[in-house]
Image (cartoon, grey):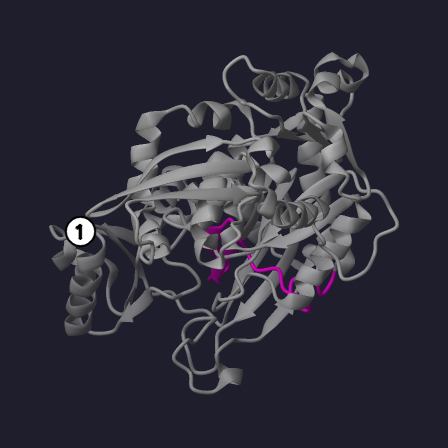
Amino acid sequence: MKKIIVVSNPAQWNLGIKDVEVISSKEYLTNRSLASLKNVRVFNLSTRYTYQSRGYYVSLLAEARGHKPIPDVKNILDLRAPALMRIVSEDLDELIQKSLHRIKSNEFDLSIYFGQNVAKQHLKISQELHRLFQAPFLHARFYFNKKWTLQGIRAISMNEIPEEHLPFVKEVAREYFSKKRYDRARDVETDYDLAILINKEEKAPPSNKRALVKFIQAAEELGFSVEVISPDDFGRIPEFDALFIRENTNVNHHTYRFARRAQSEGLAVIDAPDAILRCSNKVYLTELLENNNIPGPKTMIVHNENKNSVAGNLGLPCVLKLPDSSFSLEVKKANTPQELNQLLDEILEESDLVIAQEYTYTDFDWRIGVLDGKILYACKYFMAKGHWQILNWASQKERDKVGDFECVPLNKVPAAISEVSLKATALIGNGLFGVDVKEMNGKPLVIEVNENPNIDFGVEDAILKDKLYLKIMRALRDRIEEKLEA
């Protein structure tokens, strides 16, 4: 994607960055040849962003031309909203107090350059304010009365930056615009920017390290410039054309906020926020599958008023799940009435509802991978040694924590398993899904649908190899191009 920096005086911005064009705001507004460009990201560093100023019109016309401006008009208008200052001050209160606790005066001015400050202790608050308001240069004013509060924030021009800060500003600008995403130099020009969200602290990530390398290689082959981002990079979402989430997702979680922000900014997204919303809550998913006659284990939605009828309806043992549990972390088996009552009491303290299912043991679960309405792969996931689940978190031996697997050719998958998987995912929409299915007496039972399925090197790719990663990355590229053609 072409990058243009729009400034009042281009002579001040000789950053020496390849493939980044620096032009004046006057040229951007008046040169008609720029209006016809496609796949352009505009970094608006104009002197002023006030309503109907030249900076305001740069962002406004960039949006009208189908370019992607930073900041966009919404961000510019947000800077003029006093009510928003109060909300931001409340939301960031803990971070503000931590950042400014050493300041001795009653007022403090914070200069923010591309989300950074010359003082390292103010880095986090600088990043958060940049995330919210997006303008390249910001000036935030704080006032202390019993505690620190944000009084106002505004975009500033290059002319307002203290001379002693200019070397630092040029350094972070070069870093911001060059985005050194690779360990090796790239000789090919890329079409689109892709962010892959991962969390290095995650206990059971949906893709192992070698799979992530394969995703990056596949994306680059299809013309993407790829950057692996972390949960701290929320404010950078508008810089990209697509977001691929390779972190376990949940609605009450930063992954949903990433997906929602990316969708609102017009990015192609896997996993889309609608899919996260529909799949991650088992109460919703249970109702959806039952109402559409998708076969599954006998299930109850349990609350304090009906908890005493669980054993009578489902028998023992039975399985209990928190509505937003994932990867068996909050899935329990109750073997006796006493154990059932204890577990229900514990879970209902945390959630008003709990899912209870009849216990259906099989040696393995089918995991059917579905991409945009077509089956992508099929695996058998065998239960962990001596355990009733695929993952045994309590095992002291690392080799016994995870069961074995077998990747199965699609023509060897029972037709009923394939059909029920496609029917279940069609209720969610297009996207990348993993459907967990048990086969009982020759009949399929859908256990759940995951919108963020495991794709591990050596497991799900055992048959398709590199083609698996190319198919998923091509689906993202197709989404971008559909938006551009719309």
Identify which residue, 209 or 55, lies in the foreground.
55
Instruction: Using the rendered image of the protein, determine whether residue 436 is visible from the camera's viewpoint.
Output: yes
Mark 1 burial class by Cα count in 10 Å: few <14, some 14-19, many 20+: some
Task: Identify the image quadrant of the C terminus.
Answer: top right
In this view, the residue farthest toward the bottom is: 397
In this view, the residue farthest toward the front is: 163
Up-down: is 392 above or below 137?
A: below
Drawn side of residue 101 relative to residue 129, left or right: left
> Would you identify the image quadrant in which residue 321 lies?
bottom left
Q: Secondary structure at mark 1?
A: loop
Q: Residue at x 53, y 84 (%)?
A: 399
Instruction: Using the rendered image of the protein, determine whether residue 430 is visible from the camera's viewpoint.
Output: no
Identify which residue, 28 or 222, lies in the foreground.
28
Identify which residue, 149 or 337, lies in the foreground.
149
The magenta-colored residue range is 435-463
Find disc 1 in the rendering and name its residue: 303
